[in-house]
């Protein structure tokens, strides 16, 4: 009887938890992507908010929003909050990063010379 329970309960529980976390993460991903798209269209495209640049002599550093996402995820992982941080928010942060990677043709240009 115990072997039967192990063969049924553990796989079903594992699948159930995986499905639950995937749904949360996926929902957060979609929400983060669309919020970023709406914010970008309303503020960045109209010029109400400017992109963040840091100057280093002849060079400029562009803080793309995919970099912000990487920094936030790195910080959450570094302080040990990854296991307890809500998966829907992790998905939203990844959605923020994906928006930049899909829509900015120069997403890879982080450092460039001043003109």
Image (cartoon, grey):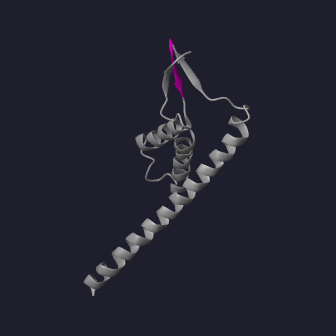
Using the image, determine if residue 97 lies above or below residue 31. Answer: above
Which segment is the magenta one? 57-62
- Count of labels shown? 0
Q: Position of residue 97 (x, y in %)?
A: 53, 43
Q: Position of residue 71 (x, y in %)?
A: 48, 37
Quadrant of res 17: bottom left
Quadrant of res 47: top right
Outermost residue toward the top in this view: 57
Outermost residue toward the left in this view: 3
Q: Does the magenta segment cover residue 29?
A: no
Q: Residue at x 73, y 41 (%)?
A: 42
Q: Residue at x 68, y 46 (%)?
A: 38
Using the image, determine if residue 33 lies above or below residue 63. Answer: below
In which quadrant of the rendered image does the C terminus lie? Answer: top right
Magenta: main secondary structure equals strand
Q: Residue at x 56, y 59 (%)?
A: 27
Q: Position of residue 40 (x, y in %)?
A: 66, 40
Residue 46 is left or right of residue 59, and the answer is right
In which quadrant of the rendered image does the N terminus lie? Answer: bottom left
Q: Position of residue 2 (x, y in %)?
A: 27, 83
Residue 40 is left or right of residue 115, and the answer is right
Between 112 and 94, which is closer to the camera in this rendering? 112
Using the image, determine if residue 5 lies above or below residue 39. Answer: below
Q: Residue at x 50, y 12 (%)?
A: 58
């Amino acid at each position: 009887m115990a072997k039967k329970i192990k063969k049924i309960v553990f796989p079903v529980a594992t699948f159930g938890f995986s499905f639950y976390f995937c749904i949360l993460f996926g929902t957060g991903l979609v929400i983060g992507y669309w919020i970023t798209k709406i914010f970008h269209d309303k503020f960045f495209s109209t010029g109400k908010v400017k992109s963040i640049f840091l100057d280093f002599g002849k060079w400029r550093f562009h803080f793309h929003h995919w970099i912000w996402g990487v920094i936030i995820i790195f910080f959450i992982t570094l302080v040990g909050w990854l296991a307890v941080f809500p998966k829907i928010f992790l998905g939203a942060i990844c959605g923020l990063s994906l928006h930049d990677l899909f829509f900015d043709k120069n997403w890879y240009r982080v450092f460039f010379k001043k003109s």
